[in-house]
Amino acid sequence: MSYWMKKRHSLASFCSSNALPKQCDIAIIGTGMSGVATAYHILSKPDTGLEQPSVVLLEARQACSGATGRNGGHTKLATPVIHRLAETHGIEAAAQIVCHQLDQLTALKEVVDKEDIDCEFLSTRSFDIFFDEKHAQQMYAFISSEQAKGTPWVKEVQWIGKEQSDKITGVKNTKGALSVPAASLWPYKLVTELLSKVLDLGGQLYTETCVTAVKEKDNGETTLTTSRGLLTARKTIFATNAYTAALLPQYESIITPFKGQNSHLSPSPSFTPPMLLDNTYNLHFDSHYADYLIPRPDGTIILGGAKWTYEHDLKIWWNSVDDSTLINNETTTHFDSVMADHFYGWENAAAQHDMVWTGIMASTPDVLPHVGRIPGSKNQWILAGFNGGGMIQIFTLTQAIAKMVTKGIEYDGTGLPELFKATDARLAVRHQK
């Protein structure tokens, strides 16, 4: 069980009525961050003079029981990802995504403050730690080059050379580090409290209501076959991330589910840390593998990653939707070693797991989400395929999706990064695994 979901919210198995309605204006499939935030934006900002749409959220299991309720609670400017995008798509395209990520941090804080949501939200900084010399030099060269050009977003980033990085970060044997804007939070609390707001605003929720088939009719309405009967929606939003291809077969091998493992570490009660860990971390062992680490306010640690311990065995993690079982013992063993091996003064902290769990993420061939009107559809929209990075993408994407659905704005009028747009061309590129 996920650490975040150890106490289930009162809406976990909620249904707004005994029977599913026959019709609605907008159906949203999925109650993670994507589905709930989209519903919130639709209902909290209705057009003046227009009747509020009827919004129905459908969830196959319990509310927010998928990736949002199982992730690290980590939102940060993903500079190594930006570096890769700059190499593959150019610096201008990468800069669009940086601006989007920075907007995300602002938007999350704004909604937490506005709705007074108790989710332990903390605006902070995050360290990207580089243990590999070559990788560190690549990142240093990239940041230095953009600084020399006067690229605006680089003002948010600070390079820490290896002469100082151990002392500043508290991590051993580093070859350099980046300090970037970040936030930590309790994701399950954020989304379930937003879900409460959605119901207060007139939305309807049906958990444990599995959608098994969708069919868009000639008039643009979609008939959804569910475990509670049929629902006809004028407009439908697929906030289904890893599970998208089960309902939209055109996304088979394009949005592919994969399993990751996460943990909660508790040091010995007698342990006193040598320095306060008030930053979050990504520990980059090389350019391909990294752990993510989020210190909790109570002195415990959320730690995930260790992909190299299982990547070779595709059958235990790739194209899997089973989040009820762990990946392997080697992954957990690695988690138990991280604090002692890599953090100064934690050698005798006995910071080992008391909870370990898995979650299902979604991979796309270009490592980018699919957002906007589904190609070839009239009244169906998608936001899915977050490649394990949804927390730094979703909230502002849902603001845009809400405008597309309620105001008729097309993708190109939203200001979102061009690379995220759902297109026929992207549907032609499939995973080769």
Image (spheres, grey):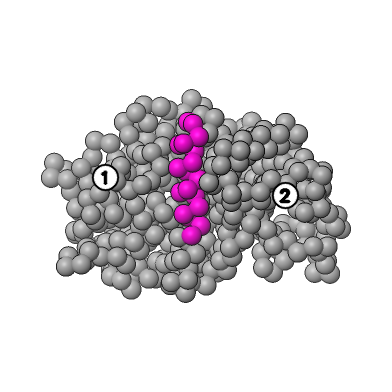
Q: Nearer the viewer, mark 2 or mark 1?
A: 1
Q: Which residue is mark 1?
A: 410
Instruction: Say the numbered circle drawn on residue 335.
Output: 2
**In the picture provided, is 125 more to the left or to the right than 52?**
right
Report whether residue 315 is seen: no
**In the picture provided, is 260 more to the left or to the right than 415?**
right
Name which residue lies at 47% across and 55% down: 104
Which SS does the magenta portion mostly show? Answer: helix
Name which residue lies at 72% across and 66% down: 299
Relative depth, front residue between 48 and 201? 48
User: Does residue 173 lie above or below 115 as drawn?
Assistant: above
Residue 17, percent across and down? Answer: 28, 69
- Looking at the figure, which quarter contains the N terminus? bottom right
Q: Amino acid at mark 1?
A: Glu
Q: Residue furthest left?
A: 219
101 magenta-colored? yes
